[in-house]
């Protein structure tokens, strides 16, 4: 994948472009929660309101039932089956008046009492904000990715054990089932079978009565899907073995009936299988700008070819707060990859462009980027504030875009450098990897990567291609900015 639209968006921040992209998003009204933890947090808030209304609905139902029972008791119960007894009843003038009054006055009242469903109306409104099928699919993609990239066992995952960390959550039968169907649809039959088996096992447990009574993933149906998954890769002659597998301990992984696909280079990098990073140089840099004589930067050289540095403690908690604390989903847009060979786009994360307007935060960040790079960092910050979501990743790409393929860049030049600030720690997953040079960088709050994307002759440096591993657990926030080449023509040093 060559140029990424998102990267394009960060960089070519012509005032005209940004509202256009925003407008496009608004028109489509894509309400996707999965691709940003911030957005998922909003969904949790909505669920909270939903549950509050549901609780209040149950409370008022109880009250209604009590009141209705009282009313029922208050209306005389005479046997009115026979015409004779009905006539006798209304021949009594008091009964007749009572009947007329009740029918005239009470009936509509009771009906509107029963129908009064303020909570239901509120819940109806919340349902309008529910995640759609695309969102659900994104979530399943995220979980599938976590399982595949980190080579997790379905059994461990379902029990909340991910990459050595025990979460205090277990997956329920409907969740196992939907993941199983998802794997099945991707023709990942062994993995699908694992999830069907987990669903089947889960359904036997007494601990989930709601799943059994309300959702009813039928156990027989699940068994059938398990067998079909096995048969896709196996043979009908072994059906008894597959049946035996179903009642085996689900902690024992199923045998792959077709060879398990080998891990890709990126997957290996994400699992931490690259050889350890050689220690190049760690130093205090106090030369790039005069300010650094007072406050030198903690600089770690992590690669010489291409040139990549890692800086420590270059973003403060207060700055992270100011940049993100009040950012809502509505102010952020969905970022996509852009693969020019197909019209297929992949959603990756939510992004907001922090333009900066001369306030302290703006000036501090601009100056810090100048301290790091020694380059002309412009008047305003103009950087992308990015929040990843559930299992979000960023496939391999280069931040350069190759001018020959993108003539619109001819006036500014290609993207010379990239700044990537990590605003949060990511406890599990979410590393930035440079697969061509065996480099893995785990986000550390307050640190930043800085690298050159192109050679001295302005040609793309393909070894800078990088990817972001799926986040397993954590809230991954980054800041990113590029500088275009031609502006830096007279200040950029020539590196060997
Ligand atoms: C674009 O996507 C297609 C299908 O997903 C893939 O085969 C192709 O390699 C991608 N192209 C680039 C330039 O990454
Ligand atoms: C799997 O595919 C079927 C048939 O196309 C579809 O109805 C179902 O929603 C898909 N399930 C998942 C979880 O993707
Ligand atoms: C500080 O960083 C600049 C820019 O990357 C570099 O040119 C310079 O050599 C560094 N100075 C020291 C003392 O490491
Ligand atoms: C966030 O919003 C609150 C309430 O409107 C406000 O008091 C606070 O100053 C804002 N914080 C930042 C960093 O903008
Ligand atoms: C990356 O690591 C592999 C071994 O895992 C090694 O064969 C390869 O040469 C390394 N590549 C670079 C650029 O260091």
Image (cartoon, rainbow, N blue to C red):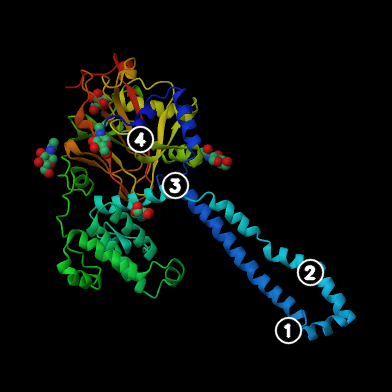
Label 2 residue SS: helix
Query: Where does the image place residue 404, in percent across and percent down from the top left?
Result: 26, 19
Could you say which disc has been placed on residue 81 in the image? Answer: 1
Hey, which quadrant is residue 445 in on the image? top left
Is 114 or 4 nearer to us in this picture? Answer: 114
Task: Residue at 25%, 58% (x, y): give it.
Answer: 191
Residue 219 in the image: above or below residue 186: below
Say which residue label 2 marks. Answer: 106
**Image-quarter location of ligand 3:** top left
Is 245 or 371 nearer to us in this picture? Answer: 245
The residue carrying pointer 4 sits among few (fewer than 14), some (14 to 19) or many (20 or more) residues within 10 Å by Cα, namely some
Q: Which of pointers 3 and 4 lies earlier in the amino acid sequence?
A: 3
Q: Residue furthest front?
A: 83
Is 250 or 45 nearer to us in this picture? Answer: 250
Say which residue label 3 marks. Answer: 33
The reply to whether callout 1 and callout 4 are in contact (CB within 8 Å) is no
Residue 401 in the image: above or below residue 197: above
The reply to whether callout 3 and callout 1 are in contact (CB within 8 Å) is no
Between disc 2 and disc 1, the foreground one is: 1
The residue carrying pointer 1 sits among few (fewer than 14), some (14 to 19) or many (20 or more) residues within 10 Å by Cα, namely few
Say which residue label 4 marks. Answer: 314
Query: Where does the image place residue 26, in percent across and percent down from the top left?
Result: 50, 35
């Amino acid at each position: 994948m060559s140029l990424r639209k998102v990267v394009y968006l960060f960089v070519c921040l012509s005032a005209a472009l940004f509202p256009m992209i925003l407008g496009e998003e608004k028109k489509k009204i894509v309400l996707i929660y999965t691709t940003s933890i911030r957005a998922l947090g909003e969904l949790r808030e909505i669920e909270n309101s939903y549950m509050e209304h549901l609780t209040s609905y149950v409370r008022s139902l109880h009250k209604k039932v009590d009141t209705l029972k009282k009313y029922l008791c208050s209306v005389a119960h005479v046997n009115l089956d026979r015409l004779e007894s009905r006539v006798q009843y209304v021949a009594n003038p008091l009964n007749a008046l009572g009947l007329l009054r009740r029918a005239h006055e009470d009936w509509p009242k009771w009906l509107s009492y029963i129908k009064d469903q303020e909570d239901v109306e509120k819940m109806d409104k919340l349902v309008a904000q529910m995640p759609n099928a695309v969102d659900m699919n994104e979530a399943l993609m995220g979980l599938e990715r976590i399982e595949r990239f980190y080579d997790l066992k379905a059994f461990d995952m379902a029990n909340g054990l991910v990459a050595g960390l025990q979460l205090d959550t277990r997956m329920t039968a409907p969740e196992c089932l939907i993941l199983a169907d998802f794997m099945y649809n991707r023709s990942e039959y062994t993995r699908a079978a694992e999830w069907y088996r987990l669903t089947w096992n889960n359904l036997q447990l007494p601990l989930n009565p709601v799943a059994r009574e309300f959702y009813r993933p039928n156990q027989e149906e699940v068994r059938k899907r398990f067998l079909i998954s096995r048969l896709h890769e196996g043979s009908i002659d072994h059906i008894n073995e597959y049946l035996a597998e179903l009642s085996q301990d689900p902690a024992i992984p199923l045998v792959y009936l077709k060879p398990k696909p080998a891990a890709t280079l990126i997957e290996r990098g994400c699992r931490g299988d690259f050889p350890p990073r050689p220690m190049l140089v760690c130093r205090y840099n106090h030369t790039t700008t005069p300010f650094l004589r007072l406050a030198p930067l903690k600089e770690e050289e992590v690669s010489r070819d291409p040139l990549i540095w890692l800086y420590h403690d270059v973003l403060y908690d207060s700055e992270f707060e100011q940049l993100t604390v009040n950012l809502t989903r509505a102010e952020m847009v969905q970022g996509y990859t852009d693969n020019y060979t197909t019209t297929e786009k992949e959603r990756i994360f939510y992004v907001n462009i922090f333009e900066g307007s001369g306030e302290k935060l703006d000036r501090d960040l601009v100056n810090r980027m100048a301290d790091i790079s020694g380059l002309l960092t412009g008047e305003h910050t103009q950087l992308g504030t990015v929040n990843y979501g559930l299992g979000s990743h960023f496939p391999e790409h280069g931040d350069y875009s190759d001018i020959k393929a993108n003539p619109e860049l001819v006036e500014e030049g290609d993207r010379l450098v990239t700044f990537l600030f990590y605003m949060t720690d990511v406890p599990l997953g979410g590393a930035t990897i440079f697969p061509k040079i065996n480099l893995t960088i785990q986000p550390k709050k307050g640190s930043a990567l800085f690298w050159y994307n192109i050679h001295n002759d302005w040609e793309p440096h393909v070894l800078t291609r990088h990817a972001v591993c799926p986040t397993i657990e954590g809230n991954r926030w980054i800041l990113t900015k590029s500088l275009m080449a031609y502006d830096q023509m007279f200040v950029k040093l020539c590196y060997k």
